[in-house]
Image (cartoon, coloured by chain):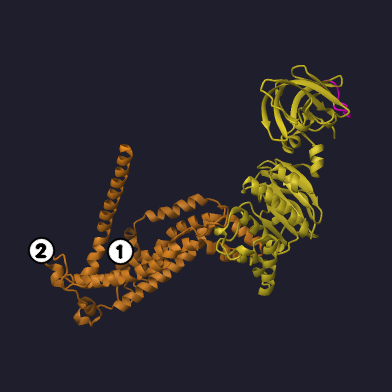
Chain colours: A orange, B yellow
């Protein structure tokens, strides 16, 4: 009996330790985010106070008001940045998904020469840090005149995302049994129909998650965008954050307010697609 | 409704031939089972008929059309896959009606066809479920329903029962046979299970290493196996094969035991052969069928017994080889007990020891 009690106690202790560990980890991960959100509502005095004010005692929307205000009052072209971000991210994500679907399908289903080499090279391209490319890209884009354009940025983001979407979507198509497409072909479909009516819907969850990843990469990317965008016509929101820095001051409050606006759409999108992210759609089509 | 003809069909992967120039004529409405051990090319052959594998050489004819270059959708066939291949994102109703929807039939016609198929296969209460919410046997029936909805010329079955448990398999076997009797279409059915082959087939095609070894009705291949491979593959338990040499009209086994050559066979002295005896034709005295015109007798020690109820399977040793024999009206037998067995020579076979070819042919 004693050993059973001890076993039970151990189990509980282990579980408690588990939860505490998780709590600490989550705190470390969430605290900066919380700091950003809180500071966007706090007056600058309180943000900069020494010793720090932990519990906010004055919350207001001043930073937001200023941000959307005129140029003289610390305003930044939020809507233009938002639009730029949206155009660049959505377009590059769509293209990356289309290419990723074609490539992923080919890697999952077709036999061709040097397939594994091609795959390794594609994945190795992910090992190159994006910033390392910023100077060559800057020069090439400058010469070809696509610097400071949506097109240039979209091109870069597509190149960044395609290897990843191919890899992810390849994995999802591999999980779709070949027989499904074969059954569809026997049922009267062309190859094209078999793909769109059967394989695509079954792999939809995976494709959606690849899309989310590609979108977030483009939406949050800063290093390359800060080099390749020069003006309001193409600056994205992460680059727009820099508008709050001037030679001697940093407008932390304003920066946090813009950051919150940046986080919101990404968060909303993730929640919407979350349902699709839960894989297991293929369950039941073939033997259990 | 259609005949199917395979004419010197070859399947080649690079330099490797997996199906070697096989020819087969299947009559309209016939139920043909391709059977053989795994890797014998039976599934590949079926997939070539379906259009899922390219035909490297030769011709496949369905009805009166050479279909070599037709895609699967133009062959008017339907296929039941080993893993069922149901569309997981569609309900049973949508799964059943999918082919008709692709063919752009009017909705009323689709509904009627789906309801009819569902009624035949007792799927009506499941129509609004998705495959994930079905049991193995139900999925199997949906897969069959999807096949019958479009009234194809030819049904192709690729090991459809191998994922079911033994009881369900027996049940579905009967349903498939009933279905064939009702629908009357040509069926090509692939299995590695000889019991399925025997019970379902009008004709069995036994394949091995990409060749057709024998074609015949279940009883023909059972009673007249073309070689020792067929003899051991068809029938359960497998036929006993005892190596020996023919001398003076008798087969002399390794330990000197001599058994007369089965009647009607003339084999030259000194030829090395395998004597083939099914368990049903070697029975202990007093527990056997009435003796036939030509009987031989041997004494064997029993090493193991498998009681099956109405009969017991006895494992005994003869000339160093293991022999399985049947005991009717069984009584308990202790291992080591020596029994006298009667061999019905009329039902025995002789195979060439090297080539395995039956000497009865």
Image quadrant for the N terminus of chain A? Answer: top left
Can you give x and y, in whole percent of width and height, for residue A101 in the image? 50, 62
* Mark 2 lies on residue: A51
> Which residue is nearer to you in this view: A185 or A132?
A185
Residue visible at 68% across and 72% down in the picture = B105
Can you give x and y, in whole percent of width and height, for residue B258 in the image? 81, 19
B136 to A194, vertically: above or below: above
* Mark 1 lies on residue: A223
Stretch of the chain drawn in magenta: B262-270
Disc 2 from disc 1: Cα separation: 33 Å
Left or right position of B188 against B265: left
Residue A82 figure quarter:
bottom left
Left or right position of B101 against A274: right
Which of the two marks, 2 or 1, is nearer to us in this view?
2
Are marks 2 and 1 in one subunit?
yes
Contact (Cβ within 8 Å) of mark 2 with mark 1:
no
Which residue is outermost to the left?
A50
Residue A266 figure quarter:
bottom left
């Amino acid at each position: 009996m004693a050993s059973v009690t001890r076993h039970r106690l151990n189990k509980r202790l282990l579980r408690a330790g588990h939860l505490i560990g998780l709590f600490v980890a989550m705190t470390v991960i969430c605290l900066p985010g919380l700091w950003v959100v809180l500071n966007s509502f706090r007056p600058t005095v309180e943000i900069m106070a020494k010793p720090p004010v932990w519990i906010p005692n004055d919350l207001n929307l001043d930073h937001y008001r200023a941000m959307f205000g005129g140029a003289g009052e610390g305003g930044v072209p939020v809507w233009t940045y938002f639009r730029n971000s949206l155009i660049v991210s959505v377009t590059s994500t769509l293209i990356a998904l289309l290419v990723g679907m074609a490539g992923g399908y080919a890697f999952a289903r077709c036999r061709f020469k040097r397939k594994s080499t091609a795959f390794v090279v594609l994945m190795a391209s992910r090992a190159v840090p994006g910033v390392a490319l910023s100077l060559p890209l800057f020069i090439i884009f400058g010469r070809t005149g696509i610097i400071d354009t949506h097109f240039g940025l979209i091109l870069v983001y597509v190149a960044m995302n395609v290897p990843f979407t191919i890899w992810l979507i390849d994995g999802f198509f591999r999980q779709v049994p070949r027989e499904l497409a074969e059954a569809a072909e026997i049922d009267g479909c062309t190859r094209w129909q078999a793909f769109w009516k059967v394989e695509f819907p079954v792999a939809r969850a995976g494709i959606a998650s690849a899309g989310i990843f590609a979108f977030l990469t483009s939406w949050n990317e800063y290093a390359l965008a800060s080099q390749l965008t020069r003006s309001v016509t193409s600056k994205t929101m992460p680059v727009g954050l820099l508008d709050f820095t001037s030679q001697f001051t940093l407008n932390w409050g304003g920066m946090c307010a813009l950051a919150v606006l940046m986080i919101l759409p990404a968060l909303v999108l993730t929640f919407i697609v979350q349902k699709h992210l839960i894989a297991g759609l293929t369950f039941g089509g073939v033997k259990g | 409704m259609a005949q199917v003809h395979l004419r010197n069909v070859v399947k080649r992967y690079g330099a490797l031939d997996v199906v070697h120039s096989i020819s087969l004529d299947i009559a309209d409405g016939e139920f043909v089972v391709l059977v053989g051990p795994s890797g014998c090319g039976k599934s590949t052959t079926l997939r070539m008929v379906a259009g899922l594998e390219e035909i490297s050489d030769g011709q496949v004819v369905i009805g009166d059309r050479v279909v070599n270059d037709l895609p699967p959708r133009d062959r008017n066939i339907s296929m039941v896959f080993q893993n069922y291949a149901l569309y997981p994102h569609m309900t049973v109703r949508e799964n059943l009606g999918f082919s008709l929807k692709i063919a752009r039939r009017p909705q009323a016609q689709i509904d009627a066809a789906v309801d009819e198929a569902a009624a035949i296969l007792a799927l009506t209460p499941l129509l609004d479920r998705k495959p994930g919410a079905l049991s193995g046997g139900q999925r199997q029936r949906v897969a069959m329903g999807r096949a019958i909805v479009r009234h194809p010329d030819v049904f192709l079955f690729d090991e459809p029962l191998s994922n079911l448990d033994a009881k369900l398999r027996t049940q579905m076997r009967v349903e498939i046979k009933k279905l064939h009797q009702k629908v009357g279409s040509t069926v090509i059915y692939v299995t590695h299970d000889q019991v399925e082959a025997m019970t379902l087939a009008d004709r069995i095609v036994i394949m091995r290493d990409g060749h057709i070894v024998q074609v015949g009705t279940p009883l023909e291949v059972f009673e007249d196996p073309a070689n020792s491979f067929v003899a051991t593959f068809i029938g359960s338990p497998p036929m006993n094969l005892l190596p020996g040499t023919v001398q003076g009209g008798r087969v002399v086994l390794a330990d000197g035991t001599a058994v007369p050559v089965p009647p009607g066979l003339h084999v030259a002295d000194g030829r090395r052969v395998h004597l083939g005896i099914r368990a049903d034709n070697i029975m202990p005295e007093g527990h056997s069928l009435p003796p036939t015109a030509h009987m031989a007798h041997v004494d064997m020690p029993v090493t193991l017994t498998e009681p099956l109820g109405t009969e017991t399977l006895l494992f005994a040793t003869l000339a160093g080889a293991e022999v399985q024999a049947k005991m009717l009206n069984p009584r308990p037998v202790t291992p080591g007990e020596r029994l006298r067995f009667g061999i019905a020579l009329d039902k025995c076979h002789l195979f060439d020891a090297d080539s395995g070819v039956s000497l009865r042919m």
